[in-house]
Amino acid sequence: MSGSDGVRPPGVGVYRLLNNNVVVMVDGEGRERVLMGRGIGFQLKHDGVVDPAKVEKTFVLDKAGDSDGAQRVLAEAPYPLVQAVLKAVDLAERDLGRDLGRRLPLAVIDHVQYVLERLDQGVRIPSTSMPELRILHPDESRAAERMAASISASLERDLPPEEGVFLTMHLLNATRDEPNGTAALLFRRVQHVVKTVEAGLGASLDTSRPDYARFILHVRFLLQRLVERSMLAGGDSSFFEFAKQRYPRAYEIAERVKAYVLEATRSTLTDEEVLYLIVHIERLSVSLGLSEATGIDRVGEA
């Protein structure tokens, strides 16, 4: 998202009025350019001229297919909401040290407007915390929390706490270059592994404990190793056999994870990978008071 600095509409252009604060022009290269500023559309209706000094934000629409959706969002959204989101996106770009592209502000405007409309109707979107996000993507999560706080302050409206989660997902979509939603797919698989472990232990994991953070990071790197075909493998199977016998419940859960990974990725975990899963699962079990086992720290981190 770029500001109006150095970018001014030419004297001649094809203009389309979206509302009193947003117009669309066709620039000298034939691109549709959105101009935003309080009252610029009102002025255009009267004398057909846009005052460059009133242009607060401008950006080029990428494709014809995106143009209709973008114009709909900008035409329907109240301008204070547009301003609040643009301010929050600028904040996130400074926090993350990168340009977040044109689609992010449009997606966030659309999302926040939907949330506010639902709240006005007395409808609350189901809450979700997704603590794994904060561990796997700490920078984006912090930036998203600051975005939510900024939007809330600008609009003088309390947004639901879970907005930090939704905004984090929007930031990930904007900052990840992997094809076909790789980051989102990896996150869903991590979540599935967590659910498998919780089902096996019959308890919810304590997301505030260091053991939980270590486990989440381990699973993430395990799944990345599958993609990179660099799974852990060792020649000595003695400790795997010991762990298999010493921690049967953790081993059984690790085998369920192994079965899920095979189904999801068509890759079979090595005994070494399963061993480290056993170690992490047993540590989680101990931290929850579900195991009397000791000596688990003999195995290092993977």
Image (spheres, rainbow, N blue to C red):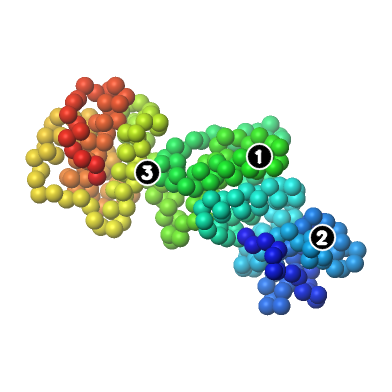
- Residue type at the position of mark 1: Ser
- Cα separation between marks 2 and 1: 26 Å
Closer-to-camera residue (181/173): 173
As drawn, which residue projects farthest toward the bottom?
Answer: 29
- Residue type at the position of mark 2: Ile
- Cα separation between marks 3 and 1: 31 Å
Is residue 277 visible in the rendered structure shown here? yes
Task: Give coordinates of residue 239: x percent, y percent.
Answer: 12, 38
- Residue type at the position of mark 3: Val
Q: Residues within 10 Å of mark 3 (few under 14, many from 20)?
A: many
Does dot 2 land on a helix, a strand or a loop?
Answer: helix
Q: Residues within 10 Å of mark 2 (few under 14, many from 20)?
A: many
Assign the C terminus to one quadrant of the image. Answer: top left
Does dot 1 land on a helix, a strand or a loop?
Answer: helix
Closer-to-camera residue (61/87): 87
Q: Say which residue label 1 marks.
A: 152
Q: Residues within 10 Å of mark 1 (few under 14, many from 20)?
A: some
Q: Say which residue label 2 marks.
A: 40
Q: Say which residue label 3 marks.
A: 190
The mark closer to the camera, 3 or 1, is 1
The mark closer to the camera, 2 or 3, is 2
First in residue order: circle 2 vs circle 1: 2
**What's the residue at 34%, 47% (across, down)?**
220
First in residue order: circle 2 vs circle 3: 2
Is residue 110 visible in the rendered structure shown here? no
**What's the residue at 66%, 67% (across, down)?**
60
- Circle count: 3
